[in-house]
Image (cartoon, rainbow, N blue to C red):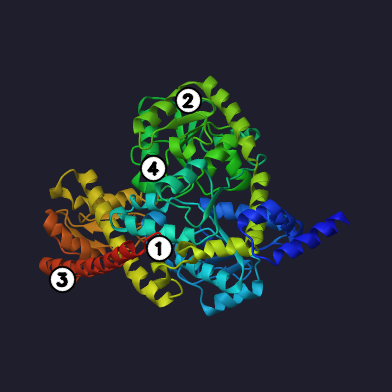
Amino acid sequence: RYFHLIMKEMEAVKERKMSVSERVELGMNMATKIDRLQDNELRILICTAAYYVLDGVTLTIRRLEAHLRARGAVVKILSTAPDNMTAEELKHIIVVPGIKVPWQQMGDGAYSFGVGLDDETQKAIENFNPNCVHFTVPDFMALDGIRWCQRHNVAYMGTWHSNYVDYMKYYFLEWLLGPGLHRYLKGFFEQLPTVYVPTNYMLRKMRDEWGYGSATELKLWGRGVDMNIFSNERRSERFRSSKGISPTDVVVLWVGRMVPEKRPDIWMSVVKRLQDEGLPVKALVVGSGTIERYQCGVQDVTFAGWLSGASLGEAYASSDVLLFPSDVETFGNVTLESLSSGCPAIVEKKCGEHLVDHDINGVCCTSGDAEGFFQATRKLVVDATLRRKFGLAAREKAWQFERNIILQQMAENYKDAIDKHADPAFLKNHLQNPEGAGRNFLSVFCCNYALVKMIAEPFMSGTRVMQDCVENGSDCVQMSRSRLSCADLLVSATLNGSSSSGGVVTSAGGDMEQGGGGGMRTDSSGNLVGMESGADQKYDKPGKFRLMGMGVGSALGAWLPCLGGGGGGMGGGAPSNSGRTVQLAWRMVKYVTVALSLTIVLLLIYATFTVQ
């Protein structure tokens, strides 16, 4: 009877307008918790860019998805998808149109980003009828998704997974995209009522350094680990022996994508120095990426490919040290899984200190300090007692992040988002802020598929050109050490890229041929005379050896005279050296024009997109 009297009194109070402080004082927000949804009433739509590419974001989403379904919730994923997926594989997926990212470091087309919600996609979302939408990637699809939520009165929130601006410095784009990307990201995340970040370090950085929080509310949501799958009890001598690892060998582990921003160069250099000292070190790589650029000179490297579940737990537990020098991690799932498996970790300080207690369960080093990473790894390699001590402490630390507790916290976060969305005072306060309402320059890109596609596709191709120029020029310098012998790059690159698929032999006529994978042919004087198709070329797909999105016959043929390389043609009917140079110059002019056009757009964004 008392409860009903209180509710009746509150209904009377609701009829007059109140401030947020008055509502809190009267306990009205507490009363709304009575009608809080149960787990099995949740209908969650999770928006991501590339659900079928295995990276930290996707793995987190898949674990969350499995947990929610186990609790009775209904979950669908909004994402781009490869063309070869079956209907069964797409059962829980709403597919959106996307543009492929052509960068070699990101899988050469494996990644895509959504550019908007077409009519068919919007109809599929409406049929699903979510009560909360979770945004994980700030692409144009997500911008369109926020507008859809506002039009259909659906709760929405987001999580921060990647330090996008930090990635740019590894792809030769920071000087061009850095300021504009900062503005774009801030404009996107400020539109979300709540953004969950993984660590206190990231929260402080976003709030204090980048100025987030004028409209959005920043909160913490960490990551969890399955303590049964990732356990020191999974250590297996059978696994080690299957990889050619003896009981006395010390395994230095790498887990994840081997791409520039993760600093595999430091990992490889540390392993090489340890091996050069004669220490019994074996290297184990779980994952994939542009590995061939970093493995030169390192012996006893085992590439296990992508592993998951118990197989991944076995790999962690059967290793001795995780060396993970990446300085772009937002949380560090790899580090947490290693600690849970009893494998001490050596990590970058700012990205890993919330997990690794220095000199207790691992070591924290300064970003980019190759010597520091080497000394820390060497200390653990030579001291088995210290490794065991760190391993026990690592397991104890991981118990703080037991997965089910962390994942259930996100289910409660969804309910919080739904409750906030039902509160007119909260919603009005958020949308009154220009950033929260999205009243900024980003609205030009939102809901305009044709415009985004027109700008994005040529720009992606142009950035691929710049990357190939820089990377191949760097390879040329490193391999030849002389501008006069850069023609050797062609043969050397073929040898490096095909070492696992076939040898190189010299025919009776003096031609150099590659066994098993195809490659280059030279005459008796060493001049390049032709190409052969093969499936294992270093730079591109079967049948073509490509540079900057064009045939290497025209591209490198034009560059070689300028570099002082061999003078032979590229095979039947190839244009003259001067003609090839003109062709390449014209292509470069077109790409530079595209880049300059996009630069003007970004400058307009930078000038117009002010934070109020």
**Point 51% across, 65% down: residue:** 432
Residue linked to disc 3: 575
**Point 53% across, 58% down: residue:** 136
Whether tag 4 and tag 3 are in contact, CB under 8 A, the answer is: no
Please report whichever mark, 2 or 1, sits nearer to the chain's N-terminal start. 1
Position of residue 312 measured from the top left corner of the image (x, y, whole percent): 58, 43
Position of residue 504 measured from the top left corner of the image (x, y, whole percent): 30, 50
Residue 507 visible in image: no
Q: Quadrant of the C terminus?
A: bottom left
Residue linked to disc 2: 380
Q: Which label belongs to residue 486?
A: none
Whether tag 3 and tag 2 are in contact, CB under 8 A, the answer is: no
Q: Which label belongs to residue 101?
A: 1
Residues at marks 4 and 3, CA–CA distance in whole angstroms: 41 Å
Please report whichever mark, 2 or 4, sits nearer to the chain's N-terminal start. 4
Give SS at disc 1.
Answer: loop
